[in-house]
Amino acid sequence: MNKIESALRRTTDTRALAFGVGTLPRAAELFVELFPGRRALVVADLNTWRVAGEEVHRILGEAGIGQDEPCVFADPGLYAEWGYVERLDALLAGTDAVPVAVGSGVINDLAKLASHHNGRRYLVVGTAASMDGYTAYGASITRDGNKQTFDCPAPLGMVFDPAIAAAAPAALSASGYADLIAKIPAGADWMLADAVGAEAMDDFAFSLVQDGLPEALCDPTGVHAGDVGKVGRLAEGLLLSGFAMQAAQSSRPASGAEHQFSHLWDMEHLRFGGASVSHGFKVGIGTLASTAFLEMLLEAPVERLDVAGCVAAWKSWEETERDIRAVFAGDPELVARGLKETYGKYVDRQGLYEQLTRLRQAWPELRERIRRQIIPFGEVHRRLRLVGAPCEPEQIGVSRARFREAFARIPYMRSRYSVIDTVFRCGWMEEWLDRLFGPGCIWEIR
């Protein structure tokens, strides 16, 4: 049994995946298998209609599957925004047709959420190896100016041809590569969370994401060049990450501190060059940040940690709440999020004592596991550069001063425990930031 077949036995939402060069014709086969007797509605944008949507429409028609007129979004500024969800909602409300989403992140998320709103499942035909969201539960949609994740099932079935993805713009594969290399520090974060008792490890989901990463990430130059085999391995890694999230019923297998930087910049409405920055590119810079902290943690004297001193310095919830209001001053939405998310992982002094004691006791073995897990900072930087992804914060419109400020906000961004929380709870945050942003350091603020 291969990895995809094994994953499908544990997924909660997706029942079938046709993966491989030349699999586009299987869209009709999967549709009949998963939606017998139903009509289809192809959903695409102008680009994805050209590269695969029109062909999928023809394949479905030749198989005798009834179809509504395709929905092809023609807006050149199309993105995953609530207004487009409402447009698709209105269309689906007038038909019982099953959406067949042909595209990548935006089209998939729009179809995923609108299908859920209208009480039906959908099929997706992927056109780029740009993110892990195809097979993940939830849709990332901007509503009222804020990017949010809305609960909704992953597709019931999927078709993915790596040859189509390899022909997509190189920036899409670069974004997917950055999203996949983020799973390396995310895995280390899960190890830390498990060690302190914050979130138990799911061995199946962890291995589903991690086992194939060395091969999937080994050739960033080949991915950038559009090598079908290399892009195919990248795509497989991303799809398996989505399946792991289904199996765990959580994004924890594929998301750690690095994604929290992306969430923060989403809420700060980060734009560069007049456009939004891709999820993968933001996560790639977050991966460098997380990796830098993990490397410093490996050299820290955790086995001699002054737990009593850390506990004595730990702030009460009332003091923490005041800090959150000060850190996010002037932004009520970030204040509200910070309060909610931080409360979800806050521990009192006794809880901190127990967490840090567990960490100190587990450290000799845990340190070696984390050392084997991570890719060195310089190598992550090199691979991001070779694949064509940003490898410096300025390349996504984040100054070094703003980058440093982000570290101070991350402890309050998500209830998920990560290396940032470890450093914060040990009282090392300011010292370590000086080591990253001080004179002669990797992100020196000039």
Image (cartoon, rainbow, N blue to C red):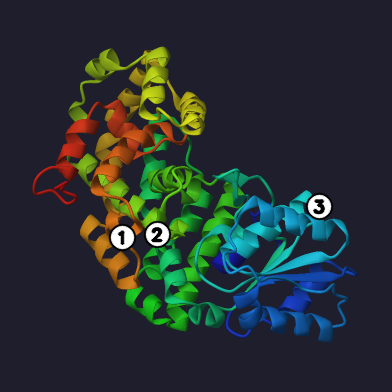
Q: Please provide percent x and percent y for residue 64.
A: 87, 82
> Of the numbered discs in the image, which one, if any, rests on residue 426?
none
Say what amino acid the circle numbered 3 marks.
Asn
Badge count? 3
Say what amino acid the circle numbered 2 marks.
Phe
The quadrant holding residue 300 is top left
Spatial CA distance of label 1 from label 3 is 40 Å
Dot 1: element: helix
**Label 1 sits on residue:** 395
Given contact means CB atoms under 8 Å apart, are the residues at marks 2 and 1 in contact? yes
Side of 310 relative to 259 (left or right): left
- Residue sitting at 72 percent across and 80 percent down? 56
Look at the image and tell me whether residue 438 can be seen: yes
**Label 3 sits on residue:** 118
Say what amino acid the circle numbered 1 marks.
Gln
Looking at the image, tell me whether mark 2 or mark 1 is earlier in sequence order: 2
Mark 2, residues whose alpha carbon is within 10 Å: few (<14), some, or many (≥20)? many
Q: Please provide percent x and percent y for residue 37.
A: 91, 70
**Label 2 sits on residue:** 281
Q: Nearer the viewer, mark 1 or mark 3?
A: 1
Instruction: Specify the farthest residue to the left.
Output: 440
- Residue sitting at 9 percent across and 45 percent down? 439
Spatial CA distance of label 2 from label 1 is 9 Å
Spatial CA distance of label 3 from label 2 is 32 Å
- Residue sitting at 36 percent across and 24 percent down? 326
Side of 120 relative to 261 (left or right): right
